[in-house]
Image (tube, grey):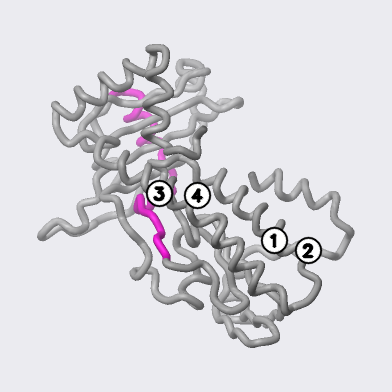
């Protein structure tokens, strides 16, 4: 997705778009004439603009600066997800052209081969941080090795190769009453994370950003910016809310907590091979926007 976005800049006149990596937003000031942003940690430059678009993910710094603390909007779904990529020619050849998931309780590991000798690992497990007396100890790598040990040779091999700092984060949604404030607007996971359970985060982020561009593009003066942002929110928020509702419905069955739930999930997976049933299951998982 990043490569595609950068490639799209080939059609833009030189100098119109500036890209700066490793430059978090540290402070935002909004006014009637626009918005100013302090960039860097510590801040080393201040930028001015007509509109600030916060597209910085589920732990959005722009959202925290303009709308308030993350705790007000983050809705955890009771689990964590981890992912990493390792070089492993043997597993790559063994599972080529397949996506493999473990049939396990309270934890699930998946893997699939990439085009090179690499293997991508995907792991989901219960988040017990709210349990009485629980303390999250060790590094993310140590925690994954502790949580997923014993799920078979392939998983143990992935754990052995796990990098020191894999992706490991809470599975959650972001629920907000509004996405715009002054000259600031949020898009993607920053305002409407649907969680991996809905499985449409990337698509919704791209489609939402494109729709925002459609509304802002024709604006000829600063006076029309607020109306354009409000119309974007009105049109797009119901779509995101539908996907979030589907994700919440899936949460209860995504990670079986006992043998009965695991058996039920097996039946559902097998039923997807029947004509017509596959569409019913897909609609239950991703909602009406899958049509």
Q: What stretch is highlighted in magenta?
A: 152-176
Marks 4 and 1, how far apart at CA = 17 Å
Q: Do the residues labelled 2 and 1 touch (CB within 8 Å)?
A: yes
Marks 2 and 3, how far apart at CA = 30 Å
Identify the mark at residue 270; answer none if there is no mark: none
Q: Are marks 4 and 1 in contact (CB under 8 Å)?
A: no
Marks 3 and 1, how far apart at CA = 24 Å
Of pointers 3 and 4, the one earlier in the residue sequence: 4
Of pointers 2 and 3, the one earlier in the residue sequence: 2
User: What SS does tag 3 mark?
Assistant: helix
Marks 2 and 1, how far apart at CA = 7 Å
Quadrant where the image shows the N terminus: top right
Q: Position of residue 249 (x, y in %)?
A: 31, 41
**Of residues 25 and 285, the one drawn nearer to the viewer in this rendering:** 285
Q: In this view, does 226 lie to the left or right of 262?
A: right
Query: Which quadrant of the view contains residue 264?
Result: top left
Residue to which mark 1 is pinned:
215
Q: Residue at x 37, y 19 (%)?
A: 277
Q: Where is residue 65 in the image (x, y as percent from the top left)?
A: 49, 77
Identify the mark at residue 218; answer none if there is no mark: 2
Q: Where is residue 284 in the image (x, y as percent from the top left)?
A: 36, 33
Q: Is 15 drawn above or below residue 107 in the view shown?
A: below
Residue to which mark 4 is pinned:
239
Residue to which mark 3 is pinned:
244
Q: Position of residue 170 (x, y in %)?
A: 35, 53
User: What SS does tag 2 mark?
Assistant: loop
**Of residues 23 and 187, the one drawn nearer to the viewer in this rendering:** 187
Foreground mark, 3 or 1, reads 1
Q: Is 54 drawn above or below residue 157 in the view shown?
A: below
Of pointers 2 and 4, the one earlier in the residue sequence: 2
């Amino acid at each position: 997705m990043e490569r595609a976005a950068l490639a799209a800049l080939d059609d833009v006149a030189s100098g119109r778009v500036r890209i700066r990596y490793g430059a978090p937003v540290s402070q935002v000031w909004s006014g009637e004439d626009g918005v100013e942003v302090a960039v860097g940690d510590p801040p080393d430059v201040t930028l001015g603009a007509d509109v600030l678009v916060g597209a910085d993910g589920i732990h959005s710094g722009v959202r925290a600066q303009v709308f308030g603390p993350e705790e007000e909007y983050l809705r955890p779904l009771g689990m964590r997800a981890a992912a990493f990529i390792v070089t492993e020619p043997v597993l790559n050849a063994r599972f080529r052209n397949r996506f493999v998931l473990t049939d396990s309780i309270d934890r699930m590991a998946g893997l699939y081969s990439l085009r090179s000798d690499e293997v991508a690992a995907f792991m989901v497990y219960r988040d017990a941080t709210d349990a009485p007396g629980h303390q999250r100890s060790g590094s993310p790598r140590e925690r994954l090795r502790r949580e997923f040990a014993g799920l078979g040779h392939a998983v143990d091999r992935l754990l052995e190769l796990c990098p020191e700092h894999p992706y490991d984060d809470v599975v959650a949604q972001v629920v907000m009453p509004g996405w715009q404030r002054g000259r600031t607007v949020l898009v993607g996971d920053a305002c409407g994370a649907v969680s991996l359970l809905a499985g449409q985060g990337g698509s919704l982020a791209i489609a939402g950003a494109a729709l925002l561009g459609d509304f802002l593009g024709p604006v000829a003066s600063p006076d029309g910016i607020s109306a354009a942002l409000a119309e974007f929110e009105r049109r797009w928020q119901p779509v995101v809310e539908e996907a979030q509702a589907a994700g919440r419905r899936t949460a209860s069955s995504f990670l079986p907590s006992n043998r009965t739930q695991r058996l039920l999930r097996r039946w559902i997976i097998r039923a997807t091979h029947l004509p017509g049933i596959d569409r019913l299951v897909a609609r239950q998982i991703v909602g009406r926007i899958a049509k």
